[in-house]
Image (cartoon, rainbow, N blue to C red):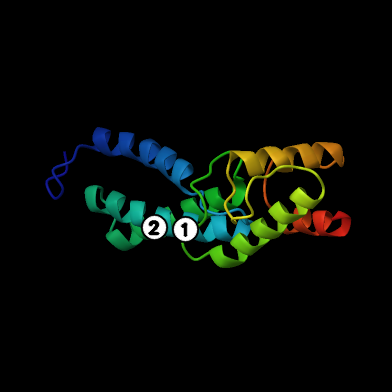
């Protein structure tokens, strides 16, 4: 047991793998690789400070290690593996406009996405999947700029 921290080496040894798993599960905001890396770094840094507080690391060392691990996790995963939604800095208004355009286009093409309200609910996702399947696109039900362009060209 360390007299400075009151924590045994065995307790510290268990914390690192557990913290690593937490970072892997948290670094997951956003669709783009950049958003995921940035949010992962922020979440990892916050978790790293906590690790630094209970281990022999300084708070700064913990934050730096957490930020690196979180950023790497965010960059190396995709939203199909881990998805905590969109980060707070994403342009929600622009996405809402894209969703409304896709919903309107799907309606014009005979798919029923529900109301053109800018909200991606189950009915909109179902209509997107049917459209993707009918047009030999990867079927994921996701709103993307490429999907919006594809629908605009046909509607």
Residue 25 in view in this figure:
yes
Q: Residue at x 28, y 59 (%)?
A: 58
Depicted 92 relative to depicted 65: above or below:
below
Q: Give the camera-side residue of 131 and 80.
A: 131
x then y, percent, for residue 100? 66, 58
Label 2 sits on a secondary structure element that is: helix
Q: Residue at x 68, y 51 (%)?
A: 143
x then y, percent, for residue 69? 48, 51
Instruction: Judge left or right: residue 53 versus residue 144.
Output: left
Residue 138 in view in this figure:
no
Neighbours of disc 2 within 10 Å: few (<14), some (14-19), many (20+)? many
Q: Which residue is mark 2?
A: 45
Depicted 15 relative to depicted 66: above or below:
above
Instruction: Judge left or right: residue 102 versus residue 25.
Output: right
Label 1 sits on a secondary structure element that is: helix
Q: Residue at x 23, y 48 (%)?
A: 54
Image quarter (top left, top right, bottom left or bottom right) of the N terminus: top left
| Whether label 1 touches label 2, CB < 8 Å | yes
Image quarter (top left, top right, bottom left or bottom right) of the C terminus: bottom right
Depicted 154 relative to depicted 110: above or below:
below
Instruction: Judge left or right: residue 52 versus residue 120.
Output: left
For the residues labelled 1 and 2, the Cα–Cα distance comes to 6 Å
Q: Give the camera-side residue of 10 and 81.
A: 81
Neighbours of disc 1 within 10 Å: few (<14), some (14-19), many (20+)? many
Q: Which residue is mark 1?
A: 41
Q: Which mark is residue 31?
A: none
x then y, percent, for residue 98? 67, 61
x then y, percent, for residue 31? 61, 53
Depicted 21 relative to depicted 73: above or below:
above
Q: Residue at x 53, y 44 (%)?
A: 83
């Amino acid at each position: 047991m360390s007299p400075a921290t009151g924590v045994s080496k065995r307790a510290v040894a268990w914390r690192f793998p557990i913290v690593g798993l937490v970072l892997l599960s948290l670094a997951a905001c956003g669709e783009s690789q950049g958003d995921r890396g940035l949010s992962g770094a922020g979440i990892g840094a916050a978790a790293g400070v906590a690790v630094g507080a209970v281990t022999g690391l300084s708070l700064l060392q913990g934050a730096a290690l957490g930020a690196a691990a979180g950023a790497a996790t965010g960059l190396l995963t995709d939203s199909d593996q881990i998805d905590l939604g969109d980060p707070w800095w994403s342009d929600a208004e622009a996405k809402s406009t894209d969703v409304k355009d896709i919903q309107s286009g799907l309606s014009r093409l005979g798919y029923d996405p529900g109301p053109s309200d800018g909200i991606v609910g189950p009915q909109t996702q179902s209509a997107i999947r049917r459209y993707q399947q009918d047009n030999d696109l990867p079927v994921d039900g996701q709103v993307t700029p490429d999907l919006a362009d594809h629908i605009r060209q046909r509607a």
